[in-house]
Amino acid sequence: MGSNKRFILSDGVQVRREVFGLLFYNYRGPRLFFVPTRGLIDSSFFNGRQTVDDLVAGIHERHGWPASWIEDRIVFLMAQLEAKGLVNGQCVC
Amino acid sequence: MANAYVEMGLSAPVNVTWEVTYGCNLACVHCLSDAGRRRKGELNTEQCRRVIDTLADQKVFQFNIGGGEPLMRPDFLDLMDYAHAKGMVTCISTNGTLIDETVAARLDHKLVYIQVSLDGATPASNDPIRGDGSFAKAIQALECLRRRDIEVSINTVLTRLSFPELDRLVALAADFGAKLRVSRFRPSGRGKRSWLQLNLSRDQMIAFSRWLSEHLGVSTGDSFFSVSTEERRQLGLNMCGAGKMTCCISPEGYVYPCAFLQDSEFVAGKLPEEDFAQIWHSAAVFATFRSLEIKSCESCHRFDLCHGGCPAIAYHTQRKLGLPDPQCLVNCVTVKKTAAGRPR
C-alpha cells in the first residue's frame, strides 16, 4: 500500500468522531466498528481530499513523532479498514 | 472492548427508536405501545422534519421506526424520503398489512431495512395474537418486498405462543430470503395485561437460551443478553444501550432512554422544541442509566455476558431500577434446581 493513497468511505458506511477516536457504521453489517485513534484522525479524512502522506505530515507537525513510525501505523490501520470493507483506497497517480 | 468505548460516552446515539404514531390497524395482545387510534399531540409533518434535521446534524446513523403502524401516517413515506436524503438509514418495523406493490416501490431504497412482524408461522398460530387475517396480509407484504429485493426480516415477539413456532419461523423467513429476529416481550403497553398469560415459563426460557446458541443466524437486537450464551458473545454488545447508544422518541416527541420505558418519570426532554444535543448530554435520566449498576449481579459468573440484563423488565416487574433482570438465566436455573429439589 502506497502512502500517497486517499481513502473514501465505502457505500453505506458512515463515520463520526468520538472521544476514543472514530466510530464507523456499516448499514450492511456488522454495523459498528470502534477505532481508537484518539484525536489523530478526523472523520473528514475519509472525504478523500487528503492523502496518507498529508495525514502523516500533519500528525508529525503537531506531535513531532517520527514520520515513518506514524506512516506504518496509518498504513496498517487503513489496510484493516479496507479489509473490513469500510473504506476504499485510491492511488493518487 | 466495544463496551469500554461506549462507557466513555458517545457524542450522540448510534440509533434512535422513533415511534411515529400510536395509530394502528391491528390490536396485538402484546403491543408495547398500546397502539390503536392516532392521538392528539402526535408530531405533525413539519415537526417530524425538524426531528430528522436535528438527528442528522448530530450524526445519528439510524432510525428504528415503529409505532403503532408507521404506514398509518399519510406523510410517512415522504418523511422516510426526507430522512434518506440526509443519509440516514431507516429500519422500519411494520405489520405489513398496508404494504402493496405501490408502497413497496416507495420503500425500495438502499438505506431502508424492513422488519415485518409475525408471531406464528401459520394463520392459526399468528392471528390469535395479531388479529384475524393479519398473517395473510403480512405474507403478501413479504412477497411484495421480495420481488423488489428489499432487505427484510421477520420480527417475532417471544411469548409462550410464539416459542414453539421458532423453527418454523426460521424456515418461513428463509423462504423469503430473510432472517428471523426475535424481540423480547415486556410488560409495557398492552403487554402489562397479557404478561402473566404470555410470558415464557422458566423451562421455556432455558430452552430458548439453548435454541439461540444453536441458531446464531437469528438476530435478537434487543436485550436477550440476560439469557445469552458464550456462543453469541461476539454477535453484539452484551449490555443495555439505553441512554448510552440509543434512545427513543415517542409520537409526541418525548425523548426516553428506551422504547420500553415510556413512563413520565423517564422523560429526558421533548422534540423538536428542545435541543437534542443538550438532552443527550445533560438529561438527568440519561445520567442515571449511564451510571446504573446492578450491584447484586456483579459477583455472578455470567455478569460479563449480561451485565444484569434488561432494566426495563426489572422496572416493570419490580417497579425499581437497579435490580436484576427477573428472567436472568442463572435465576431460571437456580429456581429450577430448587423446584426439582436436587442440585446438579
Image: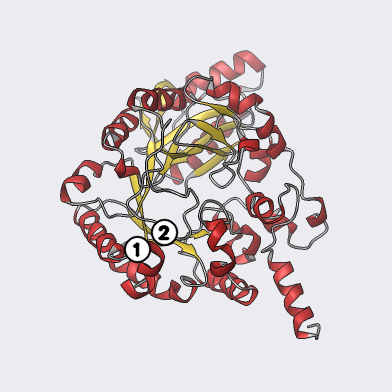
Q: Disc 2 sits on a residue from what chain?
A: B
Describe the element under mark 2 as helix, strand or loop: loop
With respect to residue A6, does B169 lie above or below? below
Counting from the top left corner in percent of width and height, residue B206 is at 63, 73
> Furthest residue to the top?
A61
Assess whether mark 2 and mark 1 are in contact (beta carbons under 8 angstroms).
yes
* The quadrant where residue B224 appears: bottom right
Structure colour scheme: secondary structure
Residue type (three-letter) at the residue carrying disc 2: Cys
**Which residue: 57% across, 63% down?**
B195
B144 left or right, relative to A51 = left
Counting from the top left corner in percent of width and height, residue B72 is at 30, 43
Q: Is residue A15 visible?
A: yes
The local crowd at label 1, few if under 14, some if 14 to 19, many if 20 or more residues have their Cα within 10 Å, is some
B295 left or right, relative to B141 = right
Mark drawn on residue B268: none
Residue type (three-letter) at the residue carrying disc 1: Gly
Counting from the top left corner in percent of width and height, residue B245 is at 58, 39
Location of mark 2 (residue): B28
Counting from the top left corner in percent of width and height, residue B209 is at 59, 70
Quarter holding the C terminus of chain B? bottom right
Mark drawn on residue B131: 1
